[in-house]
Amino acid sequence: MLNSNTSALGIVFPNSYDALVPDLVNVRLMASIPFASRYRLIDFILSSMAHCDIDNIAVMVNNNYHSLMDHLGSGREWDLVRKNGGLHIFPPFVEKGVKPYVGRVGAVASILGFLRSQKEKYVVMTDTNIVVNFDFNAMIKAHIESGADVTVAYNEQELPESMMKNEDNGLAYYYTLNIEDGRITQIHVNSKKTGIQNMSMNMFVLERELLIDLINTASVRGQVYFERDVLLPQLSKLNIQAYKYDGYVARICDMKSYFEENMKLLDDHNLDALFSSQQIYTKIRDDNPTRYIEGAKVQNVMVADGCVIEGEVEDSILFRGVKVAKGAKVKNCILMQDAVIEAGADIEYLIMDKNVTVSAGKSMKGTDTFPVYIGKHQTV
Amino acid sequence: MAKEMIAMLLAGGQGSRLYALTEKLAKPAVPFGGKYRIIDFPLSNCVNSGIDTVGILTQYQPLVLNEYIGNGQPWDLDRLYGGVHVLPPYQKASGSDWYKGTANAIYQNISFIERYDPQYVIILSGDQICKQDYSDFLKFHKEKNAEFSVAVMEVPWEEASRFGLMVADEDDKITEFQEKPKNPKSNLASMGIYIFNWDILKKYLEEDEADPNSENDFGNNIIPNLLKDSRRMYAYHFDGYWKDVGTISSLWEANMEILDPEHSGINLFDEDWKIYSRNSGMTGHKISAGAVVENSMITDGCRVKGEVKHSILFAGVRVEEGAVVEDAVIMGGTVIKSGAVVKHCIVAENVTIGENAVVGAMPTEEENGVATIGEGVTIGDNAKVGPKAMVRKNVEGGEVEC
């Protein structure tokens, strides 16, 4: 898209819902959680934006963001090295005696100066715990055509159990929508309803000037959450439209959903649904192709480059550089980068973080309802 | 600021002995080893050796190569001063010409080289598979106080007459050069990789250009002239893996050798000497239930439902249910439909092999060869392609091509 009055800048919240996956974010944040054999969660959002010519993106890192900084680098892999715009990583600006912000309001308030000096007419805001190959331009177009003040993307799904359990944890608010003729008439916070709901994807389109205005006011009043404190009280005043998304959505809301959403991609239909529309970019590691040595047995697996497989692997996702030695058995596992499964080891239902080694002959098993997580750099 | 050494990479060769594979691209751009192109090897060697300025001399079908090299970022050769530059022949105020020979290609780019004011220039060839530390080569060149050094490999005496041979004394000083001689006096084959002192190279390039009878070739003209003048010429021994992949069979062989790094000596799993390439960016490959994968290399974007044995699949290859792939090199984006049998062959990019088609065959005493399918070709259902075939055009369903 050439410069036009439909251009948008992106604001990404990489720490949203960290509290739902405490193990995985021990050494990182939601946005840099590895997913689908070679990606990090943020790759899906950044690639989607890049494909929509949203090339001025603010990433509002709050804590544990070293791994994300390392992953993003200059933003080159997403074509975000730009003289005008490009990738901006905003760490929290902490003053003496003032705690870093908690919600979206504080995050955006901290970059109001930046926002005022930008030229894009619209702003797209999103979290990263949602894996989508999303057409932001379609959403912006819908926003313009409906004449909305704010447009909120949602999908129809049952509310994740883990989120409903997490109610007391203020960091994990979720929202369901009542919609009439496309307009949002009610926003429910932490609803307990069962069955299919209109669940907010926490993706928003609005004019940059309006966002500055809303945040300015909310910030002065000491408000925290954009949906609960800004949108909800103004449902009648603002024209807030719902944008239904029918595409493939994977929501990471706990360890179980992380496991399942990875495993779902072993089904070609799901894999094609997520990846076929636009390429998802990620940091390149320059691994060699994966090598299957004589005696390897593999069934129903998704494997990235750089692996060496000599043993048996079934129903599993292998990230880059995983080694499975002779006689080792891997079943229903997610093995992140550079895992080493030594000879004769036997593992099932494990989620192994980066650089984990399972020693020769050892056996370790989780269950389908409770996959066992093993932290970074551990040796079993 | 002067550069100590810059590299000039000869990448203009048509690679006519690769037939169907080089109809639309230059030999250095031919895909290799699952996710690489041949040129990734010399380029990665340069970067790993600390050379950050590379001129790539192109002439034949440069489009794919130009696009592939781009700004050189995948090899870390996007530099403010130096980096990778593609150098095609260009029009000048007078005397514009195609590159007439390897020496002429460098001669026409003297001004490029002089921008960096190098002490040494290394001449590389874009059609070899080899992991080599050029900084070690330069160290040798300096130690010998040489004006010209050439990297040589010891080859079996019975094969020596196929190569350009360097005859050297016990101090590795070159005394004679024999181009594909009937009676070899040496078994030191030139790898076509040279280090020159720039002032010497420039002098000989200019003299060579002034000689109307010259073929403007390093092997045929420059090296004999250096010898005639008794220049300080030395042979640098290299004993690692090296393969000229100029023919279909050597290209196939080199691909198969990377499947067996323990014996062949070419190991791509080398953290200390990575080979860089422009990545496909596809998602991890998938191997379905019921598939068989043995002794193979598979990269991003592949989907395997059939049987793959002792083969290399490039990015995005699909092997459907019931298809059999064995001893084969299958380049990117190719689809092998169900029931097809693909053996002992090279299949170029974006080929479709129809249901139950047969391509190639395991070698027998009567018949052996590496069947080759050119880029974008469709082999119809139930068609048969013999082991000696070189297919450039679509083969209709049920037809036989030998």
Image (cartoon, helix red, strand yellow):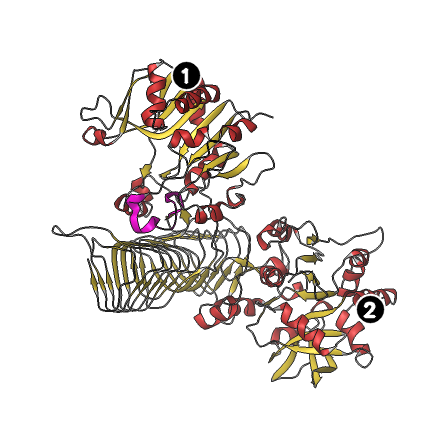
Q: Residue at x 45, y 28 (%)?
A: B107
Q: Chain of mark 2?
A: A
Residue B173 in view, yes or no: no
Q: Chain of mark 1?
A: B
Residue B210 in view, yes or no: yes
Q: Quadrant of the N terminus of chain B?
A: top right
Residue A199, image x, y percentages: 65, 77
Mark 1 nearby-residue class (10 Å; few <14, some 14–19, many ≥20): some
Q: Residue at x 76, y 59 (%)?
A: A119
Question: Is B27 covered by the magenta stretch?
Answer: yes
Type of amino acid at the residue the image marks with label 2:
Leu
Mark 2 nearby-residue class (10 Å; few <14, some 14–19, many ≥20): some
Quarter-of-image position of residue B292: bottom left
Are marks 1 and 2 in one subunit? no
Q: Residue at x 76, y 60 (%)?
A: A107
**Residues rendered magenta in the picture:** B16-30
The majority secondary structure of the magenta stretch comes to helix
Residue wearing tag 1: B144
Residue B149, image x, y percentages: 39, 22
Q: Is residue A348 above or below residue B19?
A: below
